Amino acid sequence: RLIAGDAGSMLDSANRYYANGRYKEAIRLYQGILSRGKEAPGIYYNLGNAYYKTNQLAPAILNYERARLRDPGNEDVQYNLELARQQITDRVEQIPEFFLTRWFRQFINVFSSDQWAVISMVTFIAFLIFFSVYLYTRRVGLKKSSFWISLLAVVIAGASYAFSLQQKKDVIDSRQAIVFDSKVTVRSSPDQSGTELFVIHEGTRVNIEDRVNNWYEIRLSDGSQGWLMQEAVEPI
């Protein structure tokens, strides 16, 4: 979304603070902009950079992840996210995805939700134009070509709209979180008497599977599961 008014001047000030190495002031202003509901991938990215410069890995990773969700094709965001991940304690192996699922996800992430929405709108307009030509032209060759082009356009429009909705859903209903406590014991049940299963550390990403009172059931990318206190993590 566009930044306007006071939020725009705050953004300019935050960027100047960052450029001058005054990262704490930049962090305060970036957070102020976000607290006003003015979200944009670049703000989360800049905030992540400012946290990274102050050696705060968990908040840096959190904001890189938020930037990545909103702009999945941004190579700078992905690079800095991987750079930050390399410095955390835990090295969690990821269960390989089915190759078709991986390819499909990579294809969707070529564009952001807004970009897919624009593609959907443009191709739907193209569908209306070519379908009108199909309905009103009397030239057989043009009638056939306009029919197939309009059919292709409406398919692309529908698929693009679905991709846009999926990416928007990933942002609104994210079920991932970043560990903020320096060390967290994951237990077998949502209470302190549960068996200690394993320990994870600051900056690790987890998937939230369920919630009971102030406990989250979490799953790591290697398939390990258990329960931890809600206050130990920050949802993406």
Image (cartoon, grey):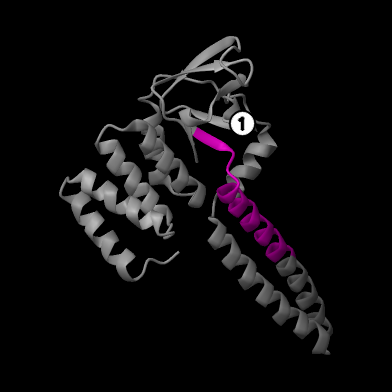
Q: In this rendering, is residue 168 above or below 208?
A: below
Does the segment drawn in magenta span residue 158? Answer: yes
Q: In this rendering, is residue 119 above or below 137?
A: above
Q: Position of residue 90 (x, y in %)?
A: 44, 19
- Based on the displayed image, in which of its 4 quarters is residue 98 positioned? top right
The residue most toward the top is 195
Does the segment drawn in magenta span residue 107? Answer: no
Quick check: 231 left or right of 117?
left
Quick check: 170 left or right of 69?
right
Quick check: 149 left or right of 235?
right
- Based on the displayed image, in which of its 4 quarters is residue 226 positioned? top right
Whether residue 137 is visible to the viewer of this picture, yes or no, is: no
Of residue 3 and residue 188, the one placed in the foreground of this image is 188
Q: In this rendering, is residue 84 above or below 32?
A: above
Q: Which amino acid lies under the numbered mark 1 shown in the image of this protein?
A: Asn
Dot 1 alpha-carbon crowd within 10 angstroms: few under 14, some 14 to 19, many 20 or more: few
Of residue 150 and residue 81, the one placed in the foreground of this image is 81
Could you tell me which residue is drawn at 70 percent across and 59 percent down? 159
Of residue 97 and residue 181, the one placed in the foreground of this image is 181
Q: In this rendering, is residue 148 above or below 29?
A: below
Q: Main secondary structure of the magenta part?
A: helix
Could you tell me which residue is drawn at 27 percent across and 32 percent down? 55
Extent of the magenta region: 155-177
- Quarter placement of the N terminus: bottom left
Whether residue 41 is visible to the viewer of this picture, yes or no, is: yes
Residue under numbered circle 1: 213
Could you tell me which residue is drawn at 48 percent across and 31 percent down? 231
Could you tell me which residue is drawn at 28 percent across and 47 percent down? 27
Q: Position of residue 112 (x, y in %)?
A: 53, 55
